[in-house]
Image: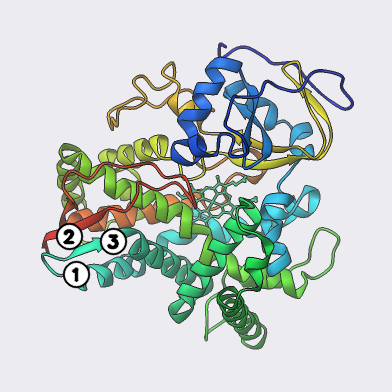
Amino acid sequence: MSMSDVVPWKIGVSTAPLPPMAPGIPWLGNALEIKSDPVRYVVKQYRRYGPIFRIKMLGKPITVLAGREALQFAATPEATEILSLRESYGGLEVEVGPVILSMEGEQHRHYRKLARPSHSRSQAAPHIAKLVEVVDQFIDGLEVGQSVDMLPAIRRMISTQLGMMMLNRPPGAYFDDFVKFSTYMLYVYQFQMWPKFMLRTAGFKKAKARVLQMLEELVEYHRRVPPGSERPHDALDEIMETVDAVGQPYGHTTLLATAMGPYIAGMDTASGTINFITYALHKHTECLERLRQEVRQAYAQGIPSADVLKDLPTLNSAIFETMRMYPLVPFLPRTAKSTFEFGGYRVDAGTSMFIATTATHFFPEYYPEPDTFNIDRDRGPAGTFNPYGFGAHSCLGAGMGELLIQIMVSRLIQRVDFQLDPPDFKATMEAIPVPNPGKYRLKVLDQN
Ligand code: HEM
């Protein structure tokens, strides 16, 4: 299918056939392929069936939309209106309160506009010294010869940086509770791989109670001590001070959910991306050495500014190429609210869907030799690189997330000489709970 192909679609009752079903094994369906290499599996089915087809996972059929033409359709206002996020992200609303990802229509547009400033790169830029300090504390605790499991360390740093910057409070002793809480949210609600009764286990209940306790404290503190000389204005004030789309003050549970956002928003996404970057760089040591030279120069006069980091070519190419090859959110989960037709096939109301936003990352017509990690490749055409999603709910923290990635990767590479452990480790591309290269460690060879 060529880039210019426009696929016909219409919303409403349809007598068209259901999309073709990819062959799979009983009950498990295509779960194993999706679990071991989700994007390449979808690209293969796209080549076979075109931009719409069905797969099956654990007995449940899922309609997949893939390719540029499908994204063009999914981003239209009409499709946005009927592709619901509630079934996937509503669990957070049940457990804590309305989160931006489960909001829809005018309520969502209004909240998103209010939350935009606190999620921006420019909000983060003045905090660089503090953000680097978080990475430095981690590095100062390393010892030569030590072998480090990077992902837990990166997650803690990201959650700490976002908590400090957006709410003036790092997660501290509550960090493990946030990790447990969001893992259960993923498995029970989003993937529906764990039964609901897991939410009644003592482990989950304790983590949730502690998460709520910290969020309640934060909201209470914000009510008691207004922003001013004692504390700066932050992301929670932004929502507390104003009214919702129908002119009412935001309810208590929305405030709790707002306070939770920074602690969990980067925990999988930004952290998982950095985890892949550190893997990829230490796998491709020629890129690592180029990057090390670049960042050592950048840090030679002290901590670089956000503008300097934005213009470092090797750093940004390495980030781009890693996000292309190892997108942390390969598909966007949606549910059809109304029946519609796309490309001559019918999608019934209530159908679970994957919008395969990152399949185009592996189309050779956009990214030649897509399976090769090549930091010198050209950027593909507009609309073919979507690690931050697309449309109405595209990542609000993309600019801030990118800055956190630039800071952490550059500082780690500048100060520490690591080696993959084991040295011949090769990523296995696990997709669950979120894409990751498998369990690798980095061994500290030297540090300054
Ligand atoms: C590499 C880092 C990141 C990646 C790859 C990423 C990816 C995404 C994706 C794909 C979505 C859309 C989900 C969907 O439509 O189903 C999203 C939404 C969102 N992200 Fe990120 N994200 C990253 C970092 C961050 C950070 C650091 C923050 C917080 C500061 C953040 C805040 C948000 C918010 C608030 C939304 C919801 C937007 C809305 O519903 O309107 N993200 N992100």
Q: Amino acid at mark 1?
A: Leu
Q: Position of residue 286 (x, y in %)?
A: 15, 37
Q: Please report the residue visible at 61 percent of the width from the left and 55 percent of the height from the top.
A: 116
For the residue pair 197 and 315, the one nearer the viewer reads as 197
Crowdedness of circle 1 by 10 Å Cα count: few (<14), some, many (20+)? Answer: some
Q: Amino acid at mark 3?
A: Asp
Tell me which numbered mark, 3 or 1, is placed earlier along the sequence.
1
For the residue pair 347 and 274, the one nearer the viewer reads as 347
In the displayed orientation, state which residue is furthest to the bottom: 224
In the picture, the quarter occupied by the C terminus is: bottom left
Q: Which mark is residue 160?
A: none
Q: Is residue 102 above or below residue 72?
A: below
In the displayed orientation, state which residue is furthest to the front: 26
Residue 263 appears left or right of 255: left
Residue 379 appears left or right of 145: right
Q: Which residue is mark 2?
A: 415
Q: Cβ of disc 1 within 8 Å of ligand 1?
A: no
The image's colour scheme reads rainbow
Tell us which disc is closer to us: 3 or 1. Answer: 3
Distance from disc 1 to disc 2, alpha carbons, whole Å, reads 11 Å
Q: Please report the residue visible at 65 percent of the width from the left and 59 percent of the height from the top.
A: 195
Q: Amino acid at mark 2?
A: Arg
Q: Which residue is mark 3?
A: 149
Q: Position of residue 301 (x, y in %)?
A: 18, 58
**Residue 66 seen in this snapshot:** yes
Distance from disc 3 to disc 2, alpha carbons, whole Å, reads 18 Å
Crowdedness of circle 3 by 10 Å Cα count: few (<14), some, many (20+)? Answer: some
Judged from the image, the secondary structure of the residue bearing numbered disc 3 is: strand
Q: Please report the residue visible at 16 percent of the width from the left and 50 percent of the height from the top.
A: 297
Distance from disc 3 to disc 1, alpha carbons, whole Å, reads 12 Å
